[in-house]
Image (cartoon, grey):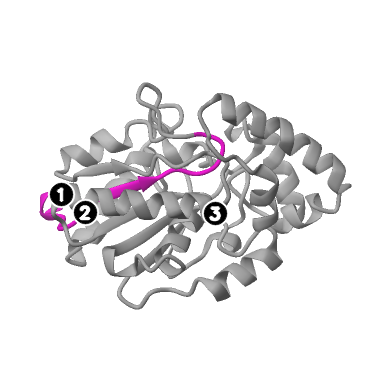
Amino acid sequence: MAEMLKYPILLVHGMGFRDNKYVGYWGRIPEALQKMGCKIYFGTQDSNADIETNGRHLAERINQIIQETGAERVNIIAHSKGGLDSRYAISSLNMGEKIASLTTISTPHHGSKTIDKLMRLPHWLIKFVCFFVDCWFRLLGDKKPNTYKVLCAFTTDAAKDFNIQNPNCANVLYQSYAFVMKKPSSDVFMWLPYLVVRSIEGENDGLLAPASVEWGIFKGIYRGVGNRGISHCDEIDMRRKPLSKKIGNGVSDIVDVYREIVLGLTANGL
């Protein structure tokens, strides 16, 4: 039973957006999980700060949640870069004893071959663009945005180093999920990056290929019902509605995937 979930859930957002009081990152997902009896908390870290900065923030957040709830540990569900921020907090900041599980949704654990190619552009150009991105996110509330450092962390070489420096903690359950779009028209916001990544790495969710996101127990590649597909934006319910009215072989509502995650954690006594 989902209401018997032992530990609270910490939802950790990814890059480019942040938890907001009025426009949440996670759409209908928190409310759906609360209806299952889950206690839900949010990471509240910066959108575009580097992994180390956000990892320190998450470590403080975890301690706050444990103090507030009296729970011994928390379950983390993290999207995209949020999974790397969480792994840093667990392994490099010794938070493993306070984490029951880490479920990652399209987190670039192995980096991106597409980013490898992007970083071959003149560094002055990349840094110039990143400077203006940082200025924008400061206006939106980030305290320490560092988009250039984040992009560097997404290269495959940087990912290898990160994985060596942040091995899995033995007492934490690690599991990961991958999603893919079926065609460019699956998401009007992701059609261009989808085509770029597809030309380099094959099928993807508009940003990441499945091979990049496998970590721990890999739960597989999730696809939408029919021809819709599931994009990087769909994964966190950006549109606040089901992906499709159709019912069949595939996901018709992303919220169902999160319900499945909670049921799995409950079955593991977490």
**Do we see residue 107 in this rendering?**
no
Give the residue at mark 1: 69
Give the residue at mark 2: 66
Is residue 2 part of the magenta span, yes or no?
yes
Quadrant, the C terminus: bottom left
The residue lying at 61 percent from left, 51 percent from top is 208
CB-based contact (under 8 Å), mark 1 and mark 2: yes
> Looking at the image, which is closer to me, 212 or 243?
212
The residue lying at 55 percent from left, 48 percent from top is 180
Q: Position of residue 123 (x, y in %)?
A: 84, 48
- The mark that comes first in sequence, 1 or 3, is 3
Q: Position of residue 156 (x, y in %)?
A: 69, 64
Quarter of the figure with residue 110:
bottom right
In the displayed structure, does residue 67 sit left or right of residue 246?
A: left
Alpha-carbon span between mark 2 and mark 3: 22 Å
Q: Amino acid at mark 1?
A: Thr
> Looking at the image, which is closer to me, 173 or 90?
90
Alpha-carbon span between mark 1 and mark 3: 26 Å
